[in-house]
Image (tube, grey):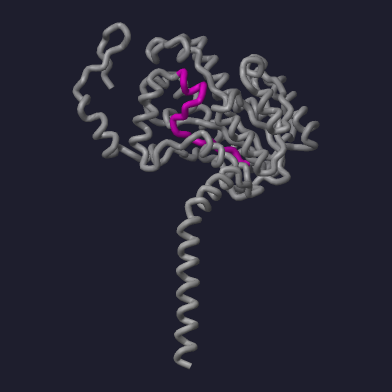
Amino acid sequence: MHNTALSVQKRVRNRTIRLAYQQKTHTFAFSNYYIETNKTMSYNLLKGKKGIVFGALNDKSIAWKVAVKAVEEGAQIVLSNTPMAIRMGEVAALAKQTGAEVIAADATNVEDLENVFKRAMEVLGGPVDFVLHSIGMSPNVRKKRTYDDLDYKMLGQTLDISAISFHKMIQAAKKLNAIAEYGSVVALTYVAAQRTFLGYNDMADAKALLESIARSFGYIYGREHNVRVNTISQSPTMTTAGAGIKGMDRLYDFANRMSPLGNATADECADYCIVMFSDLTRKVTMQNLFHDGGFSSMGMSLRAMTAYEKGIADEYKDEEGNIIYG
C-alpha cells in the first residue's frame, strides 16, 4: 500500500513538472496570440445598429477609427464629409473597407445635412442609432492669427464649422425623426473649452459652444425621444487636424507627462465612442466625458515637473521677438 501511494505521488509530481514546463515554454507564444487576436476581438456591442460617421479623412482620423470599429462591432454605417475632403482624403478606401456609402455634405449647410439623414435612412432601412460629429476647423489658426488679433469673419466660420454644425446636424435629425429611440449622438471636444491653452485660439470658443449645444439639445432630445447627446473630451491626438495647432508636438508631450495613464490614443477614443453608442450607456446624456488619461484632474505631475523645471525661468518669444508671458 505504501509503495503504491509513493508510485502515485511520483506520477503526479512528474506530470506536474511536465505541465509546468509546457506552460513556461508556451506562455510567450500564447500571450502573443492573445494580444494579436484581441486587437480585432468583437463583442457585438453594436450588432444590428445603424449609424452615420461625419468627418473621417484618413487613417489618422478618430472618425476613421470609429467607423472601422463600429463595423467590427456589428453596425452598418454611412460616411459623410465635404466634397473637397472626399476628393483629397482617403474616404473611398474607408468606404470599401467598411462597406459604407459616402454621402458628400457641407456640415454648415442645413439642406446638405437633411439629405445625409434622408439618404442614410434609405440606405440603412430606417432611423439611425448613432451619429458621430468629428468636425472642426479654424481659419484663424490656419492663418496663424493670435487670439487678440482675430479676424471676425474667420471667427464666424470657426464657430459655424466646429460647433454650430453640431446644432444644425441634431436639429435636422430631430425634424426628420432620423434617430431611433435611445439613439446616441457624440461629438469630439477638447479640454481647452474649459481651460486656457496657448495656441488653441478661437477653437476653444468653438469647443465651449459645442459642449453647451450637447447639454441643451441633450435635454430636449432626451425628454422627447430618449435620444442621448454627449461630448468626449479627448487627449491631444496626432491627427491631421491636430497637426495644424501651433506647438502641438510640445503640447502632446506635456499632456502625456501630466496624465497618470498617458495620452489616450485615437484607437482608444474610438473604443470609448463605441461604448457610448452601445446600449451599455443608455442613461448617459448631456455629459462632457473626459477621455484624457486623467489630465483634466491634474495640477502638476512629477514627470512634467522634472522635464520642464530646468527651463522654468527661460523667456519665451514669439516670431517677432516679443516676450510671451504664460
Image quadrant of residue 52?
top right
Q: Viewer-proximal residue, 27 or 36?
A: 27
| Residue under the point 46% across and 62% down | 21
Q: Position of residue 98 (x, y in %)?
A: 69, 33
Any part of residue 68 in sight: yes
| Residue under the point 69% across and 28% down | 95
Q: Viewer-proximal residue, 237 or 202?
A: 237
Is 51 on the left-hand or right-hand side of 41?
A: right
Any part of residue 284 in sight: no
Q: Viewer-proximal residue, 143 or 70?
A: 70
Q: Position of residue 64 (x, y in %)?
A: 60, 30
Is residue 241 within the magenta segment?
yes
Q: Position of residue 246 (x, y in %)?
A: 40, 18
**Magenta stretch?**
228-244
Is 318 on the left-hand or right-hand side of 181?
A: left
Is residue 182 within the magenta segment?
no
Q: Position of residue 63 (x, y in %)?
A: 59, 30
Image quadrant of residue 274?
top right
Q: Is residue 102 above or below residue 317?
A: below
| Residue under the point 66% across and 29% down | 171
Is 284 on the left-hand or right-hand side of 146?
A: right
| Residue under the point 50% across and 72% down | 15
